[in-house]
Amino acid sequence: MTKTLVILILLFDGTLLHDRIEFDSFINVADCWALGAAHREIVSTHRWGDQGGAPDFTMNYMRQGWYLNDGRGTIQGHYCE
C-alpha cells in the first residue's frame, strides 16, 4: 500500500489540478504532511501581496499566496491519502 501526497494547484485559467505524488507505505501521515510543505517550498514562492505607493502605502493582501515558480498558477493546499 502506498501513501499519496495530493497538491492542489489552481491554474490562472481557473483549472484546479490534483497533482499526485506516491510514496512507500512506511511514510506516515505526519511525514507525508511535512513532505507536502517541503514540496511547496521547492516548487513555489510566497508573496505577501501588492504594496501600494505614497501617500498611504497600503497593502493589497488579495494577491497573497504560494505562486508556482513555473508561472502556471498557485498552490492552494495539499493533503495525504
Image: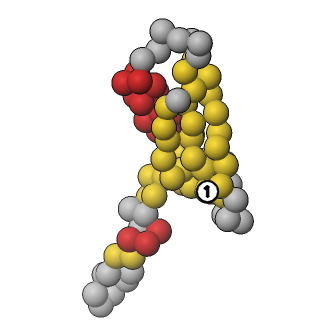
Q: Residues within 10 Å of mark 1 (few under 14, many from 20)?
A: some
**Residue 43, horizontal then vertical, whole percent:** 57, 40
- Residue 46 place in picture, x, y as percent: 44, 52
Mark 1 = which residue? 10
Q: Residue sitting at 53 percent across and 45 percent down? A: 44
Residue 38 visible, this orientation: no
Q: Is residue 38 above or below residue 62?
A: above
Taking the image as shown, residue 67 lies to the left or right of residue 49, namely right
Q: Position of residue 72 (x, y in %)?
A: 68, 55
Q: Nearer the viewer, residue 42 or 24?
A: 24
**Extreme bottom residue here?**
55
Give the amino acid type for the residue marked by disc 1 in the picture. Answer: Leu
Q: Nearer the viewer, residue 5 or 45?
A: 5
Mark 1: which secondary structure? strand
Q: Is residue 16 visible?
A: yes
| 16 on left or right of 25 | right
* Residue occupying the point 42% across, 30% down: 33
Residue that appears at 48% across and 47% down: 77
Image quarter of residue 7: top right
